[in-house]
Image (cartoon, rainbow, N blue to C red):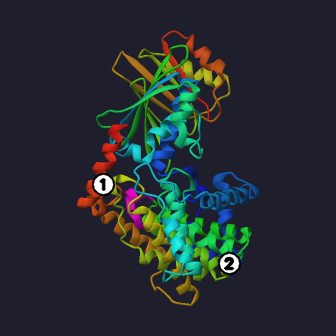
Amino acid sequence: MAYTSVRDLLNACKTSGIPMDEMILRSDLGESGLTEEESRAEMRRLWKVMTETSRNYRAEDRSASGFAGGDAAKVEKAAAAGMLYSSGYYAEVISEALKTAECNACMKRIVAAPTAGSCGVLPAVLLPLWRAGAFEEESICRALYVAAGFGQIVASRATLAGAEGGCQAEVGAASAMAAAALVYLKGGTAEACAEAFALALTNLEGLVCDPVAGLVELPCIKRNVIGAVNAVSAADMALAGVAGHIPADEVIDAMAEVGAAMSADLRETGIGGLAGTPTGQAIREIVTMAGDNE
Amino acid sequence: MRLFDVLGPVMTGPSSSHTAGAVRIGLTARKLLGEQPAQAEILLHGSFAATGRGHGTDKALVAGLLGMQPDDENIPRSFTLARQAGMLFTVGTINLRGAHPNTALLRLRGADGHKLEVMGSSIGGGRINICKIDGITTNFGADHDTLIVHNLDTPGHVSAVTTCLSEHHINIATMQLYRSAAGGYAVMVLECDQPIPAEIVEELRRMPGIVKVTSLNL
């Protein structure tokens, strides 16, 4: 059975001495009916798709609405020209988050992680490290188990659906999962992973889901960037020993409570927030009219 | 939630509900028809109608009717591929009172002229609900092998169908009964743990009072 609390997961690792990725993998075998080999093969397949999505990015691709595409290439170009504040890893995290999220909007193949709308966060923080040769595929896949295990706990205590919990449940959860994965990759303790997870989720608490015209484009694509950058800063804080003081499980419960308190207008209905602005509504008109013409 | 439901599925974007779920509705409708439709009328309701084009819901439904899975990279080209495959289709909108916001109504015709109307909703994370077949409530998730029997609303049909399944050693996971009106048409939806062989479908079709038998094998 999947873990339903971070505390149980940490205790299980501590008492058994089994590494966290292994504990999470084992907890799923009964439920999924997969063997360990099948599970590891599936994780390698997901990682392969993440690498392929990034590789298949084309700067000239546009979504059906015409509002998504080309932004990752702009960041890459500007970073290469030394025009930006960020460089190296950070600049790549930004462009990779845009890349995968833009690919999603342009109907390319992605891995929902945990959702399609938040699919750019995990690849964004992992791909640059892997490409630079900092970590092998095997270590990345172990870190992905850690990310998935924390995601399962969010699913059980709260939700991973924007329609139920707002963007904090999608990009927020993805960011927290990625933060835990980053700490694990760097050899951090299980406690530090949980701390990074809690810090990342804390910092995106309250984020609403307000897609313009109801599409997974505005602001979803750029929100993948904040999810990815937030994951890196939360992981760095946790690795440095910074504490958030509210335990991970309680942060998840708070996220669930905040999501339930959100107006339905702010939960993937495309009514409130940015979707409700004059420009948001004008874009909806354009997109809908384009549909009528076809 | 299982691990690979949190990380995964691999899918063609942009939306698990509006794209991946729509592919599954199309694919399930194709399997229920038993073949690739010669003609398909696709009608979008609610959020599918409002945001369907931007989400590629129309292309996703056509892709499903062509037999594609949600991670197929050809989904964006499904209109062209349908024309090449000789599948005629139209896409329009409809207002289905009381239906889930992400719902499509598919009116299909097979090569020999037999017809099937499937109403399906995409209920989140790529999961779907086949709400109606030929206008009668069905409500199944298309994640089990499923047998759907339309019969006259007279006594004895449930026992005849379940006896037939038991004789073929097929275990029933869930069973639902619906009817359009007392004494009219009734529908049995049986989700099973084993695939439903063609001979069962044929056997049931020959039984008196049975109007239509449809099966879905995954």
Answer yes or no: are tags 1 and 2 on the same subunit. Answer: yes
- SS for dot 2: helix
Magenta stretch bounds? A161-168
Chain letter of mark 1 equals A
The residue positioned 66% from the left and 77% from the top of the image is A185
Q: Is residue A165 magenta?
A: yes
Q: Is residue A201 magenta?
A: no
Q: Position of residue B104 (x, y in %)?
A: 41, 35
Amino acid at the residue labelled 1: Ile
Q: Position of residue A280 (x, y in %)?
A: 29, 58
The residue positioned 50% from the left and 47% from the top of the image is B126
Residue A212 in sight from this viewpoint? yes
In the rendered view, tell whether residue B218 sits above or below residue A268: above
Q: Position of residue B137 (x, y in %)?
A: 40, 29
Amino acid at the residue labelled 2: Thr
In the rendered view, tell whether residue A50 sits above or below residue B28: below
Q: Residues within 10 Å of mark 2 (few under 14, many from 20)?
A: few
Left or right: A92 in relation to B151: right
**What is the CA distance from the residue labelled 1 to the residue labelled 2?**
55 Å
Outermost residue, left direction?
A278
Q: Earlier in the sequence, mark 1 or mark 2?
A: 2
- Location of residue A274 (image quadrant): bottom left
Q: Which mark is residue A15?
A: 2
Task: Examine the residues drawn in magenta and state their main secondary structure.
Answer: helix
In the rendered view, tell whether residue A41 sits above or below residue A228: above
Q: Which residue is mark 1?
A: A283
Q: Position of residue B207 (x, y in %)?
A: 55, 11
The residue positioned 71% from the left and 72% from the top of the image is A139
- SS for dot 1: helix
